[in-house]
Structure formats: structure tokens, C-alpha cells
Amino acid sequence: MSHARAREPLVGRLVVVGLGLIGGSFAKGLRERGLCREVVGFDLDSQSRQLAVELGVVDRCAETLEEACREADVIQLAVPILAMERLLEALAAFDLGDAVLTDVGSAKGNVVRCAKHLCERMQARFVPGHPIAGSEQSGVTAAKGSLFRRHKVILTPLAHTDPSALALIDSLWRALDADVEHMEVEHHDEVLAATSHLPHLLAFGLVDSLARRHENLEIFRYAAGGFRDFTRIAGSDPVMWHDIFLANREAVLRTLDTFRGDLDALRAAVDQGDGHQLLGVFTRARAAREHFSKILARRAYVDVMHSNDLIFLANPGGKLSGELRVPGDKSISHRSIMLGSLADGVTEVDGFLEGEDALATIQAFRDMGVVIEGPNQGRVTVHGVGLHGLQPPPGPLYLGNSGTSMRLLSGLLAAQPFDTTLTGDASLSKRPMNRVAKPLREMGAVIETAAEGRPPLVIRGGQRLSGMHYDMPMASAQVKSCLLLAGLYAAGETSITEPAPTRDHTERMLQGFGYPVAVEGRTARVQSGHRLSATQIEVPADISSAAFFLVAASIAEGSELLLRHVGINPTRTGVIDILRLMGADIALENPREVGGEPVADLRVRSAPLKGIDIPEALVPLAIDEFPVLFVAAACAEGRTVLRGAEELRVKESDRIQVMADGLQTLGVSAIPTPDGIVIEGGAIGGGEVWAHGDHRIAMSFSVASLRAQSSIRIHDCANVATSFPNFLALARQAGMRVAEEGNS
């Protein structure tokens, strides 16, 4: 791969001492990019020096170290880690002028100790570094100018490191497309001891131990793929790793001692037949790799392999028919994990929504010591720890894109004896949390937020909460639920009055777990001092997910669709009421009650819709369904007006503005107002719209394609997995023509 040469080199003369894979790749990459006027190499091996010139890794090689370093601007030390002390001793005898020194060793403490040989001025020009990159091959012949692209490089400057020297080395690595981070020396060595050095030590040790057994041939003959994967790193260079373990001895020993303690606890669990302890370790470990990859990607709980711009291609036409069961109710799924974790005993959950938001709640409680099995085909088993059994999490609780998780957790964590920090992805980090922080503070909680009340939330433990009465300024089930959960721990009675009815899943489920809740009109009351008892929960299908198909079958001529086992909690049926007011043909069949929640099968047939003024009393009962209701309005005859829905502006996106922008792009008259929107029904064209990472926006424009005149390309759809992971499959099964672009 050739690179355009830079117009202005960053460095006059670069010297690389040690022409192996890392040093050679650094030299070659900078030389190819024209970032150095001259690249000089030095290696004790004469053949490596010759090959480095022939392969274009360096401009020339010097015969001696002193000759190589003469008039250098930057000197990179890419020698084995135990050779560093001798090399720095030799360099200390030369006049290096203002040259900046840097190295590539995987342990930094010993390198910094070796730097004591350098004079004070040279120490200030020394920038220790560690590129975390490699290859199965080694030596200068493996040098590759793109080796560091998208790999981490950790620089560990010292207190007296010259900022200009640090900036120069930082810029050179970034020029090679590396992801550069700065870290303290001690922290670097601890992190690498845990993530790299310990796994290598275990792999070497396990293979050596098994190889020395009498039945060694049988062991290796029947070793499965997992054994080969784990022990692959035992094929690494023994001399290099010998050097690393000696160089980073103290950090490796600390990590090894911690692991040995965990291993002793595992041994004891096996010895004592403690299945609960084993299950806890195994369930946490199984989820850990995916969980941490999501945190590092700063994404919601979506597949981090997705591109940032996952595009849905929705083609026009189609009609809906047959039967569907949409995923489980997200609100009930969240609460089943929360209350099941705080209950005494084992709670079994069926129909759990395996979407990303609900998975975030599971992970949070796993982090606080709750053993949770699953989810597996909608089944989750929660081994409750009781109201006072949660343990301090090892770090911040990462909640992805889930505002429900963050707001409800803040209530039940406000009275725990330990501190917690709640974080999320970029979208969640923009959403307002003062609406829960303010009343919780009035109860005695200590909560810190970022600017304008946004996440992260830092909740200080050990606070004594007092019950209070709270008149909610806005209708919000999340705020109400947050305060009810805090009320489980607060002295006396906690009561909340809402200005309009909102979903009451928390009140119903608390009663299902045997916890007394009094509901009088729009006021709910709880008192502390009771307990939650484990129960069985069957999660009905989510009416918010069903809403997309209720609208789709209403607007696509010739459609008839049956949606099975949908939750019809009266605080959630606003979408049905609004669609019926617009003329939709929706019938409730086989109504019944499951686990305290009313459910029914919904039969919807296509019907001509008309525009309406949406009654403000219905707004809180359909708050999550408005994006797709806007699509219904665009297909209706006449004008639809929404007022009193300012809450929509602080969801995963500003749903009023984003839907207005998209509808206008498709040729629909959609005028946003501060608390709503005015939509004139009419023809829907095609074009490109943006979901802004909001799952409900993406699915709503997919529904719009049924009446579009040409295709709709919907950008930024990856977060559909937060609430409806199998949306595309069900949409196609019902008769819609929507797919990921490229998979049509």
C-alpha cells in the first residue's frame, strides 16, 4: 500500500534501534508517509541491517550505535526488554542534543528505572511507550507500515517529561493511524499484567503441566477446539516472555495472587458442591466479554461489528396478513429483573424481551452480585438476594441506551450502603436525569450529575431516605417507578401523585411479588418494612412493538393481521384508542389476565384513516408510540394535531423534530410545535431519512414505505436491537418489503 508523502516532515532524522517487527514497522510506516527527512536504522545483526535497507524499511543503516544516533531528532528503542538497561547506559555516554527518546517495551516500570542512567535533561526528553500490536511473523522481513492502524499505543509520560517531546511522539503514532492513550506507568503495568501477561503465564503453565503427565498423549489427542484456542498463546516466543515476566515481576505477582484467591474460591465451590457460587461465576463470565466490548465501543447493547450507519432499505407496497407474536413487553422485562433481584427466592421469567435495553438491566444486577441465568429463548431465572443483598459493583454500571434502566435504578440504588456510578452510550448521556435526581434528593439521596443534570449519575451510598409525598410536574412512569422503588427503603410512607395516568407496571408487579401498594385514583403509596417474595412472571407481548404492525395493517390496503398475546394494560392502550378515533379497525379477542397484567389478541384490518385532534388525556398513554402514529397521520385524510407531548423531545432523539424532518423529506406536510406537531395527510414519496440512532424512528419509517411512491433509505438503524431485535424478520413475514441494505 503506497501513501502520499507528507508535504512537511514532522521529524528531521528518525533513528530506530532494533529492526524487528515493531521497530521496522514504525520506521517503514513513517518513511512511506514522508514524515521524516531521513530514517536511520541500527541493529546488532548485520543481516537485519542489510535487509532493512533492501526492503525500504529505512534509508540507511549505521555500523555503530553512536554513529546511528548522531544528530538524531527522535530515537526509538525497539530492543528486547531486558536489553534496555544496557542500551540506555550506552546512550547516556553520548551527546544526543535535544533528541527525543522513546521505546516500545510491554512493561514500563523497569524501563523507567533504567532511565536513571540518563542525565536530567535526557530524562525530560524520554517518552516511554507501548504499541499493543503484533503478528505471527517476526523480524524485519515482517515489517509492515500499516501494522499499528487501529491498534492501541499507550504512552506513559513521567512527571518531568517535556510536553513538547510527548506531543511529538504522540503525533508520530497518530500519523500511523494508531489509537493513542496516555497512562501512568504503574497503572499500565497493572493493566497489562492482567490482560496480557497473566493469560500467557496460565497458557504456558497449563500446557507444561499437562505435557508432563503420564497420560499426556491421550490429553492432547482428545483436546477440543476450546483447549487449542486457550493454549494457542503458549506458542509465543519463550525468550521474549521470559524477559517480560522478569521485567514486570511485581505487577504480575499482584495479579497472580488475586487470581489465585479467585481460583481457591472456585475450588472450594466445586469441593463443597456449591452450585450457586459456580453458576454466579459462569453466568457473569459468559456475559462479560460482550458487555465490556460494548462499553469500550461506547454503544448501546448492539452488535459492535455493525457499522455506525446500518441502513434499512424499505421498498414500497405490500400488505400484511397472517399471525405474529411480537417480542415481550420491555417495561415489564426491565421490572421483572429488578424486582426478582430484590426478592427472596428464585423468580422465573418467561417471554423476556431479549433486546439490548433489557439486557443492560440484567448486566447491572449481575455486576451487583445477583446470579441470573439466561436469557434463553425468553426464559430468565433470577436468584434473588433480598432487598438488602446487593453488593457494590466493581465499577460503573454501563446501561447502554436504556433510560428506563438508569431512571429506575437510581431510585433503588439511592438507599444502598455503597456508591454507584451510572453511565451509558452517547445518546443516553444527553438525556435529562434531574427529573429523578431532584425528588430523590428531597428524600435524602446524594446524587451528582454532569452538566444540566445529564449522565453520568454518581449516587453516594449510606444515605438514610425519608418517605415523602411528591406531586409529579410531568406524567412519567419512569419517575413514578423510580420513587416507588426508593420508597421500599425510605422511612415512613412514600406517595406519588401524577398529573395524568401513566403505565402502572411497577405497582402491579410489586403486588405480584407480595409487596403492598395502595393505589387511589392517580396516587400510589408504598411503605418500607415489607419484603418481596419470588414469583413466576409471564411477560406479554409489548404493545409498543405491536403498534408498528397496528399502523402497518391499518394503512396497507387489503391487510388483515392477528397479533397474539399482547399486553393491554389500560395505562398503555392509548395507541389503540387514538387509532380507533382515526377510524382504524382493531378488535380485541380472547381477553384474559396473565400474572396480574391484562392481555388479548389484537385483530387489525386495513381501514381509511382520518386526521384528528389527539386528546391530551391520551398523550401519556401512547408516549412511546407517537413516531409510528405520525406515519398513520401522514396516511390519513385531513389534519392531525398533537399537543402536550413535549416529553417526546427528550427521548432517544428529539422525536418531534426528527420525525418532522423525515416526513418533510418524504413530501409530507409536518410542522413541529414546541409540544407537538401538525401533520397534513397526503402522498408519501421516497428518499433518504435519518433515524439518529433512535429505534422507534427507524421502524416508523419502515412502516411508512407501505404507502410510499418509491424506496425509503433509513440511516442509522442499528439501535433497533434495543427494543425489537427481530423486527426485520417479523416485518418480512407479515408482508412488508424492508431489509438491511445489501441483504434484500
Image: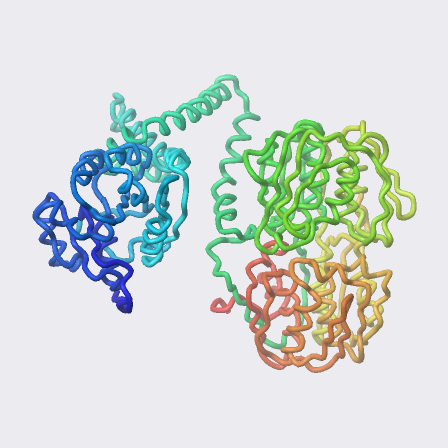
Q: Residue at x 27, y 36 (%)?
A: 115
Q: Position of residue 24 (x, y in %)?
A: 21, 52
Q: Residue at x 37, y 45 (%)?
A: 154
Please say which color scheme the image uses.
rainbow
Q: Quadrant of the N terminus?
A: bottom left
Q: Quadrant of residue 568?
A: bottom right
Q: Nearer the viewer, residue 216 or 296?
A: 296
Q: Nearer the viewer, residue 173 or 674?
A: 173
Q: Is residue 594 visible?
A: no
Horizontally, residue 279 falls left or right of residue 419, namely left
What is the residue that sits farthest to the top in this orientation?
272
Residue 693 vertical placement versus 216 (above, below): below
Question: How many numbered marks have been drawn onto this rendered protein structure?
Answer: 0
Q: Position of residue 626 (x, y in %)?
A: 74, 64
Horizontally, residue 350 falls left or right of residue 529, namely left
Residue 489 vertical placement versus 303 (above, below): above
Q: Position of residue 584 (x, y in %)?
A: 80, 70
Q: Residue at x 66, y 38 (%)?
A: 459
Q: Residue at x 68, y 61 (%)?
A: 323
Horizontally, residue 2 falls left or right of residue 702, namely left
Q: Position of residue 607 (x, y in %)?
A: 78, 74
What is the residue that sits farthest to the right in this orientation?
521
Horizontally, residue 384 falls left or right of residue 193, namely right
Residue 295 vertical placement versus 234 (above, below): below
Q: Is residue 519 visible?
A: yes
